[in-house]
Amino acid sequence: MPAVLPSWRDDAARSAILNFVALTTDPSSAHFVAQEDRIAVFGHDGTLWCEQPTTVQTLFARESLEKLAESAPSLRDREPFRTLLERDPTAAHRLGKRAIFEAMALIDAGLTLPEFEARVRAWLEVTPNPALVRLCANLVYQPQLELLQYLRASGFSTWIISAGGVDFIRALSQRLYGIPPEQVVGSSNRIEQRFDAFGGSVLCKLPTVRLFNDAEAKVETIADHIGRRPILAFGSSDSDLPMLRYAMGGPTPGLALLLHHDDAFREAAYDRENHLSPLIEGLDHARELGVTVVSMARDWKNVFA
Amino acid sequence: MPAVLPSWRDDAARSAILNFVALTTDPSSAHFVAQEDRIAVFGHDGTLWCEQPTTVQTLFARESLEKLAESAPSLRDREPFRTLLERDPTAAHRLGKRAIFEAMALIDAGLTLPEFEARVRAWLEVTPNPALVRLCANLVYQPQLELLQYLRASGFSTWIISAGGVDFIRALSQRLYGIPPEQVVGSSNRIEQRFDAFGGSVLCKLPTVRLFNDAEAKVETIADHIGRRPILAFGSSDSDLPMLRYAMGGPTPGLALLLHHDDAFREAAYDRENHLSPLIEGLDHARELGVTVVSMARDWKNVFA
């Protein structure tokens, strides 16, 4: 059994990763990269953990919304809340990622950041995923955990660059992935600092979106938060392509990977249609873009831990 | 001679710092703070280096603007460029920080990030400060360098949270302060990724402001970039107060410091008036806010290296 990446089958995707890490970390290599420039960025939903039948954050928002609707029933008749409450992933996906995040901003408004974090953490540990027989906290892909650990052991810093809400991901990133909050970049609400009479303060989530971090915006937030070009990027949809092309576009080699969900038996098979984040261009043009497509069915021995 | 903070006089400000670090790093202390939560945030202009007679970035923008005006003389008649070219700091300051940053966004538009960084680095090493007999690269405050080093040696991470342009500060932060790019948070332009025919890409600065990082916005960007509450904050103007109050507002003790420029002999004496970032509320209410005011004249043995 191989020492690293044991859940990855010994084939082209695994070799591409091992070769790239050897190329960039061997001081005698022409493409050696200094440790501070070994930056690896990952999408979150569909890349590091399962996003089926819909994203975990959407499930969480729906539960929060249902509680809100108990005391404010008129929410049930207002869009986009009406659609979100339908429990039909296809309908929710038709709203689009941005509209869903705008709804979340409204649903979460007024919570302090510590309250929100505590709610997410408690919820994750007790809530089952509706499609798979596992808790939401156990939807992480085992091969990706091994990859994150292998990269960090090779001197890489590992970042999450997601369209999901940054506060939601940070509530779980250290525990699930070993990634600290400052290496999580996501969409965010406006925030307001509120004071008590004794100088104590707390940050509250406001009902407006501050930043929606999808597609080209991911390149801007990488520039803003990291300030260096990543040399490895791993995504799962066309909205990750700008970030993947940025990782590959530098003067030294970069590695870009796309996870293809083609495993209806162990997880789900989806790409082009009926899905919040389609993968079309990335599949059709993988070779000319220079992207390595990772097939869940073919390349992963295990999917979940 | 004391082992740490040798350029700080042995008085109240220095004691406040030493006591706070002892309190938070001694595992037997009731206020011990885990290493990952030891976060210290600093303003930049006027906190870590001299901002007189105007900020270094404004000097840089003026030189870039003068070059632009050679081929586009009509810029000389358009505001805010006309005022910026006047070389009168008082007039420039009347424009306000945001207007100056908006002008910088226009002046820098079209440059790639690597081009901009190279320009700033070359310029810093050859450009004298008009008020002091030193190069702009040598405007760093020696006591603050010692403080940054002392904090890092005590397990703190040190961050710059500035209204200045993030790309400008990153061009110098590692060399001048030992602070890596991902720990610099500032104002930013919109950014666009541009591709060549071979898949190479570069990020270009667009002429619009993406984020202006002043006052309350500093608390939002701390939340967005760090995701934890700092326990130490050091600023130099009222626009740093929201960040200082955030550092002090947590459930465990925080330390907030304000540098008072009261040293006309070694640097400059200014606070309330005729200045881009006034310090009024911070001085008048320091005691009730719980802020430690650092007097450059009284508390620092040396100002520059």
Image (cartoon, coloured by chain):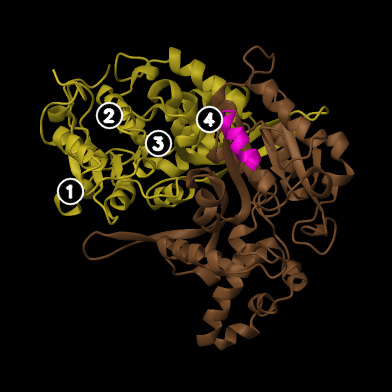
Chain colours: A brown, B yellow
Q: Which quarter of the image is occupied by the N terminus of chain A?
A: top right
Which region of the structure is painted magenta?
A146-155
Tell me the tag on residue B147. Answer: 2
Q: Amino acid at mark 1?
A: Ala
Q: Residues within 10 Å of mark 3 (few under 14, many from 20)?
A: many
Q: What residue is disc 4 on?
A: B76
Label 4 vs 1, first from the N-terminus: 4
Q: Amino acid at mark 2?
A: Leu
Q: CA distance from mark 2 to mark 3?
A: 13 Å
Mark 4–mark 1 CB contact (< 8 Å): no
Q: Position of residue A274 (x, y in %)?
A: 82, 64
Pointer 1: what residue?
A: B286
Which label lies toward us, 4 or 2?
Answer: 2
Residue B143 left/right relative to A73:
left
Task: Name the residue rendered at 55%, 44% in the picture.
Answer: B209
Answer left or right for A119 relative to A130.
left
In the rendered image, residue A161, in percent from the top left (x then y), is placed at 61, 46
Q: Are marks 4 and 2 in contact (CB under 8 Å)?
A: no
How far apart are the two marked residues, 1 and 3, measured between alpha carbons? Answer: 22 Å
